[in-house]
Amino acid sequence: MPVAARRISHLNINCTDLERSLAFYRDLVGLEPFVRTAPTEPQPGAAFGLDRVQWDAWILRGDTSDRAVVLDLLQWIVPPPVGGAATDPTTTGFNRIACTTPDLDAAYRRMVDAGVTCWSPPHPLQLGDGGTARMFICLDPDGTQVELVEGRGTGLSHVAVNCADHDRSLAYYRDVMNLQVVAELTFPRQPGTPFGLAGDVELRSTLLRDERSRFMVELLDWTTPEVQPRPAPATNQLGIFRLAWVTRDIEADHRALAGHGITTFSPPARVEMGPGVDDLQAIFWGDPDGACNEIIQTGPV
């Protein structure tokens, strides 16, 4: 049986300088900060797989829907951030976040004027169904890859996950996390420029959607070049770290995960979110490639 959690709530990105990253996602991408979570002192970190934890974070939203997935932009205080973001487009795990923007060319000009690294100008990406999608990929201040695609509004669209075993990851996100397959595409051989790669690329993609938030997980299976294994990131590693679902019954979801042979970092654990923000319960674990998933219980969903 899949978990009972039914809505993806947020995607987390770890950063080195919260104010600098906030300026990028607010002023250049166009997201709106609306909640700050900043525990005043370290607390037990078992849920995160750590000894003690403390952070400072902004939650940012787009303008597409009240139920749309939000961005949890977080700077670790205890322990401090480590490592680096995934800048190679072919490494396993969470690889890039995609956001929609109503004016792709204006977004590109903002990035260029601000000195942001972009792999290419807005570029038509050929899709396996004969269509195209205009997009470009840039790097946030810590090197996290951010894909901008044309859309009706500003908001989080999907997260790209590179898979060592595509069928294994598909079974996990479909059968355990209850996401719905909405498209399967085989990208024809084409220049790798939009991905920041020299030479041609070939890959296939499966898009799975959370029906409540409409957010999608894009599973990528690279043929040319081949996917590159990357160790599961530390909780405080820079870049995209976790994708979170909300639930009404975290204990039942914990049992459901165990039934699929999945071991969480800890049993459901209380997490203090800081002044003015309700505490919650959370569990964390890795997907088949080590990308961190989370379930939280905060009340009605």
Image: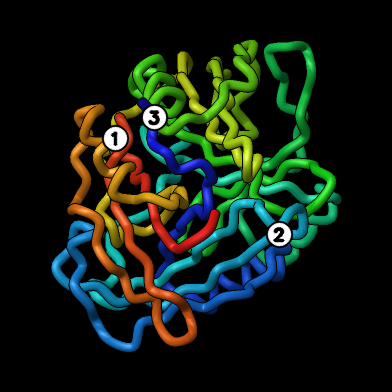
Q: Residue at x 77, y 34 (%)?
A: 134
Q: Residue furthest left?
A: 51
Q: Amino acid at mark 3?
A: Pro
Image quadrant in which you'd find residue 201 = top right
Provide residue 16's location: percent of width, then percent of height: 40, 70
Residue count near mark 2 (Cα–Cα under 10 Å), binned few <14, some 14–19, many ≥20: many
Measure how far apart labels 2 and 1 are at the Cα level.
32 Å
Image quadrant in which you'd find residue 114 = bottom right
User: Residue 62 — which label?
Assistant: 2
Q: Amino acid at mark 1?
A: Ala
Q: Which residue is mark 1?
A: 256
Measure how far apart labels 1 and 3 are at the Cα level.
7 Å
Residue count near mark 1 (Cα–Cα under 10 Å), binned few <14, some 14–19, many ≥20: some
Give the vertical position of 24 relative to 292 (above or below).
Answer: below
- Pick whichever of labels 1 and 3 is earlier in the sequence: 3
Residue count near mark 3 (Cα–Cα under 10 Å), binned few <14, some 14–19, many ≥20: some
Q: Which residue is mark 3?
A: 2
Q: How is the image coloured?
A: rainbow
Q: Residue at x 48, y 16 (%)?
A: 224
User: CB of mark 1 within 8 Å of CB of mark 3?
Assistant: yes
User: Residue 17 — which label?
Assistant: none
